[in-house]
Image: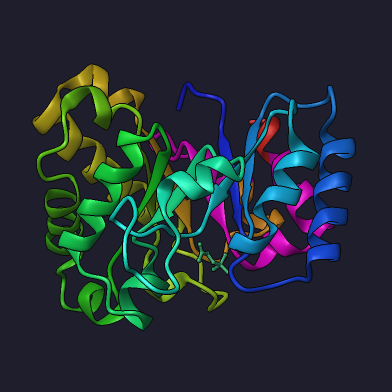
């Protein structure tokens, strides 16, 4: 691994504003001066500004869960990259499987969002992963390769280095079924290989590749012990302060 693990919580559509702010305050207090692990949280849009204020000056980053691909315009109900940046975000989740599968987001849209995020200096956490059927049919590498190829189309080498890639097998998200550390590492190696072929070894090694899908305190260490797993994207366990702190703690003693 060789890098400090990067642990990010994706709150999805959970918590109230008050609960979110309290969570952020406790997270900050608990991690203060204690921990080298880089962590972050992705709250709902409407909490971003308040939570960024609480976390300002800490080593906990704030990310949005989505953005639109256009910088502005007549897109009712959408939020732009600059808006989330203005609200204090340094990161943004792009192409999360719930966006792909529940809201029909396709690779070209995801590619455009990544480009827009990078153009305003917002770091994308680019999510990819296969469904259960795709895995059972032996198509995991094919699917992941296409998501990478299409998602990164036309993106400059210098920018690729800025990316975080989150490998999240769809069958492991919110199901309690974690990929085994070896299964995850195998796909991470494949992703690293894809990046090495396309952008060279230095860039490939600089990219953080996170694993996501039913991460909990109990499986954190074994996942991060794998050589190609550089961090974790945590859903369900990231809205419970105790569990999230335990994950960050377990990550910091790798
Ligand atoms: P989960 O979600 O940890 O609840 O499986 C992960 C994610 O959706 O990023």
> Whole-percent x and y of residue 153?
11, 45
Classify the position of ligand 1 by quadrant: top left, top right, bottom left or bottom right: bottom right
Residue 76: say if magenta.
Answer: no
> Whole-percent x and y of residue 82?
44, 44
Number of callouts: 0
Q: Look at the magenta stretch and give its main secondary structure.
A: helix
Image: 139 above or below 92:
below
Q: Is residue 12 visible?
A: yes
Rendering quarter of residue 95: bottom left
Quarter in which the N terminus is drawn: top left
Q: Which residue occupies the foreground of this view, 149 or 94?
A: 94
Q: Is residue 223 left or right of residue 183?
A: right
> Whole-percent x and y of residue 226?
46, 39
> Whole-percent x and y of residue 9?
62, 53
Residue 229: say if magenta.
Answer: yes
**Residue drawn at (66%, 59%), measured in percent from left and top?**
216
Work out which residue is located at the far top of the displayed protein and give it.
Answer: 202
Question: What residue span does the magenta drawing correspond to?
Answer: 221-250
Q: Is residue 26 left or right of residue 17?
A: right
Image: 78 above or below 82:
below
Quarter in which the C terminus is drawn: top right
**Residue drawn at (49%, 42%), measured in percent from left and top?**
91
Q: Which residue occupies the foreground of this view, 238 or 93?
A: 93
């Amino acid at each position: 691994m060789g890098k400090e693990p990067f642990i990010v919580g994706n709150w999805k559509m959970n918590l109230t504003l008050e609960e979110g702010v309290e969570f952020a305050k406790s997270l900050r207090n608990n991690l203060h001066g204690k921990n080298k692990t880089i962590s972050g949280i992705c709250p709902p849009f409407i909490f971003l500004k308040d939570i960024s204020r609480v976390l300002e000056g800490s080593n906990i980053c704030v990310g949005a869960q989505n953005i639109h691909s256009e910088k502005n315009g007549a897109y009712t109900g959408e939020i732009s990259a600059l808006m989330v940046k203005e609200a204090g975000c340094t990161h943004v989740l792009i192409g999360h499987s719930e966006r792909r599968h529940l809201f029909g987001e396709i690779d070209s849209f995801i590619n455009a969002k990544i480009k827009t995020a990078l153009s305003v200096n917002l770091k994308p956490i680019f999510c990819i992963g296969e469904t259960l059927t795709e895995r059972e049919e032996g198509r995991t590498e094919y699917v992941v390769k296409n998501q990478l190829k299409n998602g990164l189309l036309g993106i400059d080498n210098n920018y690729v280095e800025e990316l975080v890639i989150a490998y999240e097998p769809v069958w492991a998200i919110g199901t309690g079924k974690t990929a085994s550390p070896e299964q995850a590492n195998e796909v991470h190696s494949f992703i690293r290989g894809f990046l090495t072929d396309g952008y060279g070894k230095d860039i490939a090694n600089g990219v953080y590749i996170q694993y996501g899908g039913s991460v909990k305190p109990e499986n954190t260490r074994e996942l991060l012990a794998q050589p190609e797993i550089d961090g974790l994207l945590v859903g369900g366990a990231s809205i419970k302060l105790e569990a999230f702190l335990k994950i960050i703690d377990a990550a910091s003693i790798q």
